[in-house]
Amino acid sequence: MVDPKLEEEINLLHSRICQALGDPKRVLILYALSEGAKCVNEIVEALGLPQSTVSRHLAILRERGLVHVDRQGTASFYSLVDARIIEALDVLRAILASQLAASAELAQSLQ
């Protein structure tokens, strides 16, 4: 039987973080913010996405507690709440790279 506390933590992890990372554009936004706080227009320019798309994704990331907004006059600057999210993404990317390399080796050995 699964530990109820572990199950609750996993459910929270999924609802708060995993769902927020479910869109590649949001992951790209997080990486853009890893370089420092940015306003929406800077993110739009860096990623080449429409302003409405960036704003919608930032709202989701803010609701999930991954980004913070600092309003300065008419400008809103977004930053990461916890830089460890980038470390977690980097680990996931490393796992993916290993899987892809293993698949490529397997495919090559079958030729």
Image (cartoon, grey):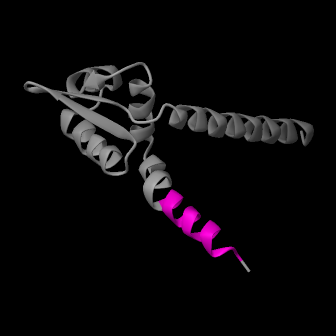
Q: Which residues make up the magenta segment?
A: 2-14
User: Picture quarter containing residue 58?
Assistant: top left
In which quadrant is the N terminus drawn? bottom right
Position of the C terminus, as image quadrant, is: top right
State how many labels appear.
0
Q: Image check: 38 left or right of 16?
A: left
Residue drawn at (82%, 39%) of the image:
102
Q: Residue at x 76, y 36 (%)?
A: 98
Residue 21 placement, left or right of 63: right
Q: Is residue 59 left or right of residue 88?
A: left
Q: Position of residue 93 (x, y in %)?
A: 63, 35
Q: Residue at x 73, y 38 (%)?
A: 100
Of 27 and 3, nearer the camera is 3
Where does the image place residue 18, in percent across and percent down from the top left?
50, 53
- Magenta span contains residue 75: no
Q: Position of residue 62 (x, y in %)?
A: 31, 44
- Residue 11 falls within the magenta-colored stretch: yes
Where is residue 49, by image quadrant? top left
Q: Nearer the viewer, residue 6 or 20?
A: 6
Q: Main secondary structure of the magenta part?
A: helix
Residue lying furthest bottom: 1
Q: Considering depth in this image, is 108 or 70 the residue closer to the camera?
A: 70
* The furthest residue to the left: 74
Query: Residue 71, how many percent across, how many down?
Result: 16, 30
The residue positioned 49% from the left and 31% from the top of the image is 83
- Quarter of the image holding residue 55? top left
